[in-house]
Amino acid sequence: MTLPRRRWIAHLDMDAFYASVELLRYPELRGQPVVIGGGRRHQPQLQPDGTRRFATLAQYKGRGVATTATYAAREKGVHSGIGLMKAAARAPHAVLLPVDFDEYRRYSRAFKAAVAELAPVIEDRGIDEIYIDLTEVPGVHDPVGHDPHGGVRAVAQEIRNNVRRTTGLTCSIGVTPNKLLSKIASELDKPDGLTVLTEADLESRIWPLPVRRINGIGPKAGAKLELLGIGTIGELAARPRDWLVERFGRTYGRWLHDAAHGVDERAVVTHSEPVSISRETTFERDLHAVADRSELRTILDGLVGELAADLRRKAYRARTIGIKLRFDDFRTVTRDLTLDDATDDALAIRHAAGACLKRVDLSRRLRLLGVRAAGLSRAAMV
């Protein structure tokens, strides 16, 4: 008799996502307290000597709130949702940057595509987090050395590596048998962390945590539990199910008991409508944009033709066309172009892809080329 495979669910959370995207744009700010939440007037100003002058919280006047902050700013008590005037009192010298949601959405699409290359069963939970079902990913159940969970650890690490190669950003991943525990685990070793837990780790890693670390226990329930003398997940787990039902109702009381014991049978829910459609190829040898121009043009034309055929077959049109390049140093670059009208026409896609290529430094040799269609809508049926 074949035993069922252990279920492995990952929760991936990007580290200080908005702030990290801004640090890619302004690398001179790395290691400094930076707060995202300003308006256009807080745009950095380029100086005659080529440096940038940044606004600081000390100069801020208004009623805005922080969208997010770097870890250096968080150490000074500045966090998402805090009023910027209050943040200024705690960290007056912190740099203040405006929000740029278009850029954050672009990086969000990029990191999710990087994950999907390795593990396609994904539940989108927002701009900076996803759940991933790793159960059927090849190699995930293979032990590595004396580590019985070495396979899933290696797969999760490769996902993290691919996100970093693609975006330049770090993420933290928690991997456990279910979504509830994985959500908790992804926070345990932030930033840039990887945590793999099983039910055997409940007592040592989960039960000492505050009850509010369980996703689904809000401020009101947390306050009520505190009044009942329950501060940790372990203390919640020690209470009988009937005792919790009596005080919190049948449904929520039972859920509290299950959650404290790490029980969660929810599936990773994927959506039937694709976010994007892409075609890519890795070359047998690295190609140069000048020396191998003709060969690259032929490859690109072929990928575009395949992508256009995919769109027509699935009855989609795309507003955004993008390209993906991986260089011989394994650095990955993407560029996107949003069109005035959605299209499934190969010529229009080829023109947009060519425009994207012109925005990339092609001095290094290439090992991969891809074309992507996003912003999908259903084509009119005739």
Image (cartoon, rainbow, N blue to C red):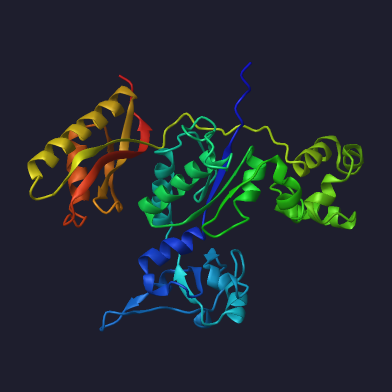
Residue 124 seen in the current view: no
Q: Residue furthest front?
A: 146
The correct choice, above or below, for 212 with respect to 316 in the image is below
**Residue 133 placed where, x, y %?**
54, 35
**Residue 176 placed where, x, y %?**
62, 41
Q: Residue furthest top?
A: 1
Nearer the observer, 232 or 272: 232
The correct choice, above or below, for 337 with respect to 152 in the image is below
- Left/right of residue 26 with respect to residue 36 in the rendered view: left
Nearer the observer, 13 or 326: 326
Question: Which quadrant is the N terminus positioned in?
Answer: top right
- Please report the residue visible at 40 percent of the width from the left and 48 percent of the height from the top: 162
- Please report the residue visible at 53 percent of the width from the left and 44 percent of the height from the top: 153
Residue 1 seen in the current view: yes
Mark count:
0
**Residue 267 placed where, x, y %?**
61, 32
Nearer the observer, 75 or 227: 75
- Please report the residue visible at 68 percent of the width from the left and 32 percent of the height from the top: 265
- Left/right of residue 90 with respect to residue 355 in the rendered view: right
- Please report the residue visible at 52 percent of the width from the left and 41 percent of the height from the top: 144
Question: Which quadrant is the C terminus positioned in?
Answer: top left
- Left/right of residue 142 with respect to residue 336 in the rendered view: right
- Left/right of residue 6 with respect to residue 222 in the rendered view: left
The correct choice, above or below, for 180 with respect to 232 in the image is above
**Residue 339 placed where, x, y %?**
27, 44
